[in-house]
Structure formats: C-alpha cells, structure tokens
Image: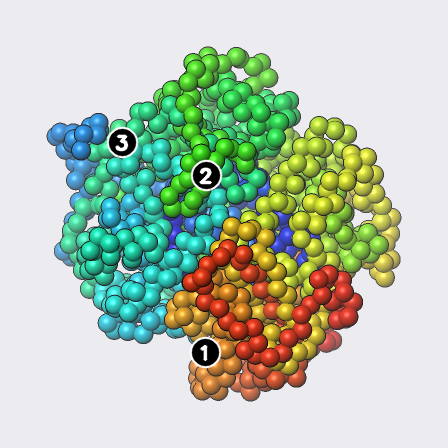
C-alpha cells in the first residue's frame, strides 16, 4: 500500500478552519459546529483547501467521488466516471489507477495524518477536502500518466517467454527495462518543455552523467521552493521474506547522513525556514519531497541530496524506527480501506507482487527476520544498494533562481548519487507471471467491513500486450470513453435507473483503479441501500445489461470530442499548481515519460481518442473475466485475513456467470447525449490591470441594505473565463446559531440529499463541463456556492435557485433512503481514528453549537417526512445574505445574479440583533497539570489505540499576542515531533500546531498510540512542555528571527490563483471582518514581535503556573487489553478539573467570549507590507 513517513507538516498550522458544514469533525459528516470567523487569520494560500470543499470542482468531485477499491464509507459521494470528469480539469493529477494498493489509498490518509498538526487543533471538515485535493498528488492521472508519452522509447523485446515455477507463461514483450546512464550531462533546450499557455514558469530538463533525470522549474515570483525525488522502487520489490522493506527504507533515510548525522536534521532546518517534508512508498515508487522558504532552497537541497548520497542507516535508528512502522500499521487495523485492500490481494496470483503486504509491521520486519536468522540491517543495506541507483531516480526542483543557478545547485549535489545502471524493478515480474490466475473470476469475495458499508464492486484486469500497447493505451486512454458513458448520472444513465427507478444504490462510479507496469484494472463500484443489498445479483445483471447496450449501440463519437474539448479548455486555463504538489507529481510521472519535453503535459493532456481501442477494451468487460466483490456488515465471518484480521467469505459465481452474460435489455438505459454546458464564450470581460507583483485589490461593496450585502470584483489579474458566486443566508438565532441542535442538523442533511437528487440529472452535465454548485448548512444558515466557466453561469444559478427554493420532499421511499444513508454515515463515526474522537468530544465543550454524529443519529430516528416538508418550507422565511461574486463577470451581470437569487428565493428582513452566531467557550484557568480533563472510552472497542489532545487556549485578541502563539507553535513543532515520535516512539500520529476560532488561537499537542495509555501520553506532553523552557530560552535572536520570517513569508506569498484570492476574500466576508489585506498586516505585526513576547505567551498561557493557562485535555482510552502498554500515573502534574458528563454544564459555568471585533485585535494599527 502507499504508505508514508507521517511527518507532520508545518504548513498545516496555517490551514484555515473553513468548516462550514454540519455535524462531526472529519468523520465523513459535515460539521455545523464550526465558526465562520476562523479562516481570515490564516495565509490565503491555504484557503484553496477550504474552497475545494465549497466549490466541488469537477476534478475534485471526481477524485473524491470514486474510489472503487478503497471501500470508502457510504458518505463518500461517488461522482460518476472519474476518468472522464477529470479531463475537464486540465490538471488530472493523481490517480486512482493505483487506488487499491495504492497511491490514492495512502495519500488520502497521509494528508490527514501527516498533517495532523492542523487537524488536531482545528478538527474541521476542511481536512476532508484536503483528502480529496491530496488525491490529486498521487502517482498517475486517472487517464494515464504519461498520457502523451508518444515519444516514449519502446523497450527491446525478448525472444522467448519465461516460465516461472510452473505458472502459466506470459509473453515477455516488455524488454530488459535498462535505462543506462549517459556518462555525461545532457541538457534539454530551453523552451522545449510543453506547458500551459497560462504557465509563467520556465523549465529545463537534465539527465545527469549518472542517469538521474531532472526537471528544473524557475519561478521568480514564488515565495516557496520545493523539491521531490522519486525512486522507481516500491513495495512490489520487497524481499519475499521481509514485507515492508521498501517502506522501512523510506523511513530510515530521514534518520541521518554522513554529512548531516543528526536524526531529523532536514525537518529541523525546514521548521526554522517555513518548510515541511514528507515521503511515501507506493507499489512501484518511493517519493521524498520538501518545501521551504524560497531563499533557503540551496542549503535545504544540500541536506536533502545526502539522503541519496550517504545515508547512515545506524543500528540504533534501525531498531527504534521499527516501532514507528508498527504504530503506523496499528492505526490502520480498524480502517476498512486497508482491510479490504489486503483481502482483495488474496484473489491475486500469490507469485505476483500485487499480492504482497506492502506496509509491513514489527512482525515482518523484526520478529520474522529473527526467526529466520535474517539480519534486518544487512538486508536493509542490501535493498538500498540494489535499488537506489541514480538511473532509477527522477528529481524535480522548483525555485526562484534562474535555470542556470538551479542547474548548478542540482549537478553539484546529485551527480554524486551512485549509479549501477540497474534495470527497472518491474522486469522481475512483468511478462513473467499474470497478476490474477484464470480462476480468480470464478469466486465472489464477500467482505465484512468495520463500518456499515454496503457495496458491489466489479473489476476487470486489462493486461498490456506489450510495451507498445502500454504506451498507446496511456496516450489515447481508451477506457475513458466507456467510463464517460457508464459513470454518467444524467437521464438514461445506469445510476439514474438503479437509484431513482429501483432505489437500490446511493451512488455509482467507475475508473481505472490499478495502473501497474504490466496491467490496468478498470472497475465499477456501487454503494447499496439495504434494499439494494437484497438485490445485489440483480444490480450486477443491470450493469452487464448497460455494458451490452453500450457495445450494441456503440460509444458515441461526440463523447470523445467533448472530452478532448474540455481537456483543451482545462489546459488552456490551467491555474498554477502549488510548488510542493507540482514537484511531487512531476517526479512521480517522469519515470514513465520517455520524452522529457512531455514531463508536464503528458499526465494531463488528452488530445486524441481511439474508438476502436475503446471498443476492444469494452469487449473484455464480460462476466467470465469479472472480479466480483460484495461488502456488507451482514457477511458471515468465515475467514480471517492475516495482517489486518479482517473477516470475509467466498462463494462461487456459479450459474450467475451465464445469466449475467445474457442480461435482460432495459429500454430506460441509454448512452448520454451531447453536453449542453460546454462553454462557448471564453472572452475576458475586463482589462488586466494588476500584475503578479501588485497588491491584490479588495472586492467592492456594490449593494448594502437590510437584506443584502454584496461584494463584487472582476478579474483584473488572472485573465480566466471563470467566476465564483457565494451566498450565505444568516438565519434567526432562534433557529440556527446557538439554537442549532442535532435535530435541526438531521433535517438539514435530509433536505440537502433530497435537493441533490432533484438536481443531479440536470447538474451532472454542468459539473462535467466545469460548472458546479454546492448547498451546505453552516452554523449561521444555508450557504449556496456556484463556480466554473462564466459563460452559462447566470442560467445555471437561476435553475439551481429555483429548485432549492421550491423543493419539498414528497417521496416516502426516497426519504427512507436518505435517513438510512445519514444513519450509516453517523455510525461510521465510531470507527474513526481515536485522535479524531478526542478532537470532536473536546469540541462539544469548547464551541457552541457542537454535537457528535451519534447525537444526530438519535434524533434522526424520530423525524418523519412531514417534519422535513415543514422544515423545507421554513428555511428561507427570514434572513440576511452576505454575497461575494468574483471573476470574469461584469458588475451588471453580478447584480443580475443577485436579483435572480432574490427573485427565486424570497425572504423577509432579519434584524442584526436576531442573526445567528456561533460562540466560543472560555476554557477556565487551571494553573497547572491537566487543566480541564475530559476522559472517554474509545467508541470502537476493537481499536488498540489511545489518543490525547492537550489544547492551550488564548484569551487576548491583540493580533500581536495572537501571532506570538503562532511563532511559539512554529518553534515547538519539530522538537515535539522529534521527542515523542522519533525518540520516544510513542506513536505514528504525533503533531502540534495552532488553530483559530472566533479570532482566538489555540495551541494543540496531539498523540495517538497503541503502546501507552492516556495518562502516560498526557504526562509525556506536559513533560515536553516543561522541558521546552530551556530550548526556548536558549534560542538565539538570529534563530528567533528565522522562525518569524518563515511565517512572514508564508503571508507574503504572491497570489497566483483566482481560487485562492476568492477564498481569502470570502473568509473575511464570512467572518464579517472585511480586512482584505489581513495577511500583509499580520506580516507587519509579526516583524514587530520580540522573543520576549513569545516567552511571555509561553510562561503565562502554556507552561505550568501560568496565570492565564487555559488548558483542555481530551483523552480517549482504548479498552483493548494489552499488558505491554506503558502506563503513567494520573497526577504526575497535579492540577485537575474533571469536566461534567454533559457539555452544557461545563459551558454554563465557563461562559463565552465576547464576539470578536477589530478594535480588540488592533490589526488596523499595522500598515500592510506590500512587497
């Protein structure tokens, strides 16, 4: 599986808490228990994460939507055909092609857990959007990495097929896989790298004498520099007796080199200079990457290069890091993604590396090796020596320096990487043994999940005939054409029939789910209702009926034309990718792109299609070749999988193969028609008056009265034919705000699902064409967001607004389906990670309104259809609307859309004093110890992990004091991680960071562990805090200024994306602060800080004895018996205030902070820094 080092990312500290939705925190539920005032305090570059939740951009909808082999919880909204949808985005990014074993699998969790610093403090649903966004960083495009690899050199063919251990021979047509080093520096021509017309970066390709391939990117406007090196070896190459070796090697490279022997030295350097690092291991690759302030690239690159020149692999670190691997494995034991993934490997050929256990654990790496008399460190050195060869590495570096300077940096450091001219690792299996034996399709695997998941998955292995077939398939992406039809959600679609006519599925999607050196796997996943589970064989038959219809009717050529057209639009108007995701993606992709000029374009371009090739693959999607998987909590527990203990059963397909092969034809199933939403008018409506170096001008208030406050800004900077329109309806405080309760939350969710169903057939084509809407419910009231190409936006706004305003659910069967779906989502909370439980339980005591998904579940059962109908008619009676319309729209058009919303959704005036507001609870001062202690049992009785979050709350709104908290967090982050994770090995999830709620920052320390109980973990946190007094005192002025400058540079990063700018403006409007140059003013305030200011915050608010020490400790204790678990005394640090069982009692006693205002923050006293 794709597994990572799990290093906490410092950038997580500045991600916005942009949780606008209802219900739990990172539980698969939206959160309504969040403030709308927290986002403005964070750097705007982080706002893009938040906006991804709101905008539901086509590619994100697709990526978040379809994870066929990841078995996500039913709350995942599957959105049609991933491959086809992604085309419109321009940047196809990652891939679910390796989603099962996979890249996407770990990338989804790695973003959550490696950046848990932000989550541990913020605990908001923006993390879910980060998961979706981070899927865009995974290895290959859903349409094929190296899509345009037409220049890829085909490898020489062997003359004879190989026979391996009695396995059926597979013709070896893939060649020797040797990519020899040139022995001299090869420099590509400047300007030859194909890039988007909107891309202002300069590129150069290199091949070093040792064979290491390089892509350089010069961006004089960047404030961040980044680098990534991808080694073309993954867990498929693990020694047979040592599962997890590639993953273990990845961990070890961070633990010292000959030139920089201190463990974690790179992280230490990056933490001072505004950076972060991480790594992950996938089936066929291991990727290492970092980002840093732009003026610190060269020293960071020097430290980074030594990972590949002279790693130490010390004996002490080798033994200690095994605990980190075990902790990482332990956190996955109760996660369905990992459990089902490993079960499905059982149907694979056990002699093919697909079947391997990729993560590894302490048993495979330590206990088993000792039993077999294998010296682990010797094997580690041998693995590294065998596979870490320069000719199997790809490096991408992005900085502000010129290409010549970047070239010198790289050549002088990476030319020393050892080269052995070894062949690609896949030569050990491709062309030698099939991934699945012929009999695999004759057995249905039935999985019993941890969560209440019900689904059907149908998958087909599509091996490459030879290297030419592989490259051609990557070029023309033939599966995208039938994916475009099978995954459609409009009228006549497979989803519409199964969902609306039959009531058997909640969602359906399809995509390439595996993309390995020797095969692709294409699959369909349908999440089932309870009734659908009773008819899952019929669901499968209907799928085959659609496939048969598609073969008979033929894939319409206009479908391919549309995909090409939408991809061209996305490429033409592509927004610039953030440095770290750019280099990570590029380094991953370079291995399969033979033509260096295509390093950037190949993964995202789709310029031609091949109907004949699509039809050939479509013909292979037969019942005889299909791998069928059923998932249900009612599966009889007959067998137990070895590594995760997951339960499953099997049964023969039997006579169903014949029945599915001759399905009944269904007249309602049709191919999708032409898409009416593809934009035609791409003209830019205004003049471009702002340059990339100019300060961003704020939006203009174009309407302000007792019902509306509307802000507008045309696109005078980016020149893209796109626009965004936000409408936040603040409702009465007797309905929302503090009055919001779990019952209202449940009603909101039912209404939202019903509206989504009502609009889906209409809006799906729009989404495919890059035009989106989103309805969510915040603590203040409903928020409606529109985004995409502006050409057809006004008409789209009218139709969606009409539906929302007039929609009253009336179908009892659909109502029951919505309730069932919400109940499943709520129950899934029990199986979340313990640190998430610690966060949400704590939040119910700290922010009002807040409640858990289980409270919503309790209310859900008593809600009738009549209750929802009454609710639907009452939503928009009284309101005040804040709106932002920004992008390629003229003022008159913007006001026209406002008028449309006003006409379609009428409402009465709501006085300011009656408007809903969330409130922040004032945590009591407890001068020492645990502070206010919340201790709960882990809701999942089978989870062996406990978790602790120790959160220190600020109370002074002065912006200078608030920013001192951020500097303190920046200084503590790396030492905290190094102490509790690297040295003490307490767990895989160890992080610290700040969050902002109602204008007040908090500093949180998070630890999740299977090796220690909660009192031990809390004592470890408190001990670290006390011991930090000396390092803080010893910090030199030069080091202190470096920490400050790191935060300053984050705020002064130049705006390069319209999305980011819009998100920043909307955050200020949501929070009703309207300080649109907040980041520049905060930068000025940061530079006014002294070390004494930070020490004062530490001593007064964080350390033992502080007069304003407002600490809340949330402990989640595992009930799994384990005698080896380290135990700590409860009162190592006396000072304890056990909170009442009911949050309302705590809140009633503690009280609330006053609502934030600009005078208290004093932010306007700081002149913004504009350069």
Mark 2 or 3 closer to N-term? Answer: 3
Mark 2 and mark 3: Cα distance apart in space = 26 Å
Task: Decide: few, some or many residues near mark 2? Use Cα within 10 Å; few <14, some 14-19, many ≥20.
Answer: many
Residue 891 higher or lower than 1039, as above or below = above
Give left or right: position of 226 versus 526.
left
- Residue ID for mark 2: 647
Label 2: element kind = strand
Mark 1 or 2 closer to N-term? Answer: 2
Where residue 436 sits in the image (x, y, percent)? 31, 31
Mark 1 and mark 2: Cα distance apart in space = 52 Å
- Residue ID for mark 3: 434
Give left or right: position of 557 versus 1000.
left
Where residue 601 sits in the image (x, y, percent)? 38, 44
Label 3: element kind = loop
Where residue 1106 sits in the image (x, y, percent)? 62, 83
- Residue ID for mark 1: 1042
Residue drawn at (37%, 25%), measured in percent from left and top?
Answer: 441
Mark 1 or 3 closer to N-term? Answer: 3
């Amino acid at each position: 599986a794709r597994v990572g080092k799990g290093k906490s990312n410092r950038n997580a500290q500045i991600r916005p808490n942009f949780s606008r939705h209802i219900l739990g925190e990172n539980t698969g539920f939206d959160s309504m228990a969040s403030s709308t005032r927290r986002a403005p305090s964070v750097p705007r570059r982080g706002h893009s994460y938040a906006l991804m939740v709101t905008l539901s951009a086509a590619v994100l909808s697709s990526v978040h939507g379809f994870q066929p082999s990841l078995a996500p919880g039913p709350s995942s909204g599957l959105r049609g055909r991933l491959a086809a949808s992604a085309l419109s985005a321009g940047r196809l990014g990652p891939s679910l092609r390796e989603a099962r074993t996979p890249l996407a699998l770990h990338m989804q969790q790695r973003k959550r857990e490696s950046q848990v610093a932000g989550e541990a403090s913020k605990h908001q649903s923006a993390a879910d959007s980060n998961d979706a966004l981070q899927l865009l960083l995974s290895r290959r495009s859903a349409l094929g990495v190296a899509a345009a690899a037409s220049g890829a050199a085909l490898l020489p063919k062997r003359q004879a097929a190989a026979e391996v251990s009695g396995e059926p021979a597979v013709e070896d047509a893939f060649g020797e896989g040797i990519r020899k080093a040139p022995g001299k520096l090869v420099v590509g021509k400047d300007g030859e790298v194909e890039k988007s017309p909107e891309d202002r970066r300069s590129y150069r390709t290199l091949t070093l004498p040792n064979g290491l391939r390089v892509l350089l990117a010069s961006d004089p406007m960047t404030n961040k520099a980044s680098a990534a090196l991808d080694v073309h070896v993954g867990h498929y190459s693990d020694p047979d007796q040592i599962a997890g070796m590639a993953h273990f090697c990845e961990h070890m490279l961070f633990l010292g080199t000959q030139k920089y022997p201190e463990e974690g030295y790179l992280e230490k350097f990056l933490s001072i200079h505004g950076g972060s690092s991480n790594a992950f291991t996938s089936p066929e690759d291991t990727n290492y990457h970092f980002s840093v302030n732009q003026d610190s690239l060269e020293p960071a690159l020097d430290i980074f290069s030594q990972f590949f020149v002279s790693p130490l692999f010390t004996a002490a670190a080798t033994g200690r890091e095994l605990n980190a691997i075990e902790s990482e494995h332990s956190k996955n034991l109760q996660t369905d993604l990992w459990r089902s993934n490993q079960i499905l490997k059982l149907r694979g050929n056990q002699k093919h590396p697909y079947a391997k256990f990729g993560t590894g654990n302490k048993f495979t790496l330590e206990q088993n090796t000792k039993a077999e008399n294998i010296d682990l460190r010797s094997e580690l050195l041998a693995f590294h020596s065998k596979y870490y060869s320069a000719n199997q590495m790809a490096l991408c570096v992005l900085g502000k320096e010129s290409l010549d300077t970047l070239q010198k940096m790289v050549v002088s450091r990476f030319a020393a990487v050892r080269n052995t001219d070894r062949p690609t690792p896949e030569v050990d299996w491709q062309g030698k043994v099939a991934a699945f034996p012929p009999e695999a399709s004759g057995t249905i695997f039935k999985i019993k999940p941890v969560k209440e998941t019900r689904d059907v998955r149908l998958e087909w292995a599509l091996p490459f005939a030879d290297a030419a077939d592989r490259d051609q398939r990557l070029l023309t992406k033939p599966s995208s054409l039938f994916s475009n039809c099978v995954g459609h959600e409009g009228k006549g679609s497979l989803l519409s029939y199964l969902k609306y006519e039959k009531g058997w599925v909640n969602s359906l999607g399809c995509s390439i789910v595996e993309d390995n050196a020797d095969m692709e796997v294409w699959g369909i996943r349908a999440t089932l209702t309870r009734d659908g589970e009773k008819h899952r064989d019929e669901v499968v038959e209907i799928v085959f009926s659609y496939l048969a219809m598609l073969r008979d009717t033929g894939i319409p050529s206009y479908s391919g034309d549309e995909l090409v057209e939408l991809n061209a639009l996305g490429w033409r108007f592509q927004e610039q990718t953030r440095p770290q995701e750019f280099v990570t993606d590029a380094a991953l992709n370079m291995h399969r792109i033979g033509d260096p000029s295509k390093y950037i374009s190949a993964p995202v371009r789709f310029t031609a299609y091949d109907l004949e090739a699509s039809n050939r693959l479509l013909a292979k999607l037969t019942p005889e070749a299909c791998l069928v998987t059923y998932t249900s909590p009612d599966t009889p527990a007959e067998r137990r999988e070895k590594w995760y203990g997951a339960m499953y059963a099997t049964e023969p397909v039997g006579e169903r193969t014949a029945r599915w092969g001759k399905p009944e034809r269904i007249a309602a199933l049709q191919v999708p028609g032409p898409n009416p939403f593809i934009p035609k008018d791409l003209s830019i409506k205004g003049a471009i008056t702002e340059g990339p170096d100019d300060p961003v001008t704020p939006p203009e208030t174009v309407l302000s009265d007792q019902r509306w406050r509307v802000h507008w800004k045309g696109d005078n900077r980016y020149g893209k034919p796109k626009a965004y329109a936000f409408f936040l309806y603040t409702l009465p405080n007797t309905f929302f705000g503090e009055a919001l309760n779990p019952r209202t939350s449940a009603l909101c969710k039912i209404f939202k699902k019903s509206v989504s169903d009502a609009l889906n057939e209409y809006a799906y084509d729009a989404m495919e064409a890059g035009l989106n809407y989103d309805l969510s419910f915040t603590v203040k009231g409903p928020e409606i967001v529109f985004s995409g190409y502006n050409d057809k936006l006004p008409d789209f706004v009218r139709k969606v607004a009409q539906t929302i305003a007039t929609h009253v659910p009336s179908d009892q069967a659909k109502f029951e389906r919505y309730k069932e779906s919400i109940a499943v989502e709520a129950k899934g909370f029990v199986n979340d990670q313990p640190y998430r439980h610690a966060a949400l339980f704590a939040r119910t005591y700290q922010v009002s309104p807040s409640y858990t998904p289980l409270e919503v579940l309790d209310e859900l059962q008593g809600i009738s259809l009549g209750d929802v109908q009454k609710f639907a008619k009452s939503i928009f009676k009284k309101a005040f609307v804040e709106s932002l319309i920004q992008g390629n729209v003229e003022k008159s058009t913007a006001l026209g859309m406002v008028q449309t919303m006003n006409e379609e959704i009428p409402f009465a005036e709501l006085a300011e004093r009656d408007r809903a507001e969330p409130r922040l609870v004032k945590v009591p001062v407890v001068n020492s110890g645990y502070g206010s202690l919340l201790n709960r049992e882990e809701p999942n009785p089978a989870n062996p992990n406990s978790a602790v979050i120790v959160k220190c709350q600020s109370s002074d709104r002065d912006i200078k004091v608030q920013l001192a908290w951020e500097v303190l967090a920046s200084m503590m982050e790396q030492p905290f991680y190094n102490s509790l994770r690297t040295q003490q090995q307490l767990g895989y999830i160890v992080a610290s960071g700040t969050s902002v709620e109602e204008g007040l920052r908090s500093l949180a320390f998070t630890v999740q562990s299977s090796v220690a109980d909660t009192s031990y973990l809390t004592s470890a946190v408190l001990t670290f805090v006390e011991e930090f007094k000396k390092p803080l005192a010893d910090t030199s002025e030069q080091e202190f200024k470096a920490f400050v400058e790191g935060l300053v540079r984050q705020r002064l990063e130049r705006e390069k994306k319209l999305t980011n700018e819009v998100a920043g403006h909307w955050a200020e409007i949501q929070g009703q602060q309207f300080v649109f140059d907040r980041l520049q003013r905060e930068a000025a305030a940061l530079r006014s800080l002294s070390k004494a200011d930070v020490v004062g915050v530490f001593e007064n608010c964080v350390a033992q004895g502080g007069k304003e020490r407002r600490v809340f400790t949330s402990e989640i204790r595992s009930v799994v018996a384990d005698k080896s678990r380290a135990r700590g005394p409860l009162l190592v640090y006396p000072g304890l205030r056990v909170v009442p069982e009911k949050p309302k009692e705590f809140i009633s006693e503690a009280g609330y902070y006053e609502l934030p205002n600009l005078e208290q923050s004093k932010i306007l006293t700081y002149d913004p820094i504009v350069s």
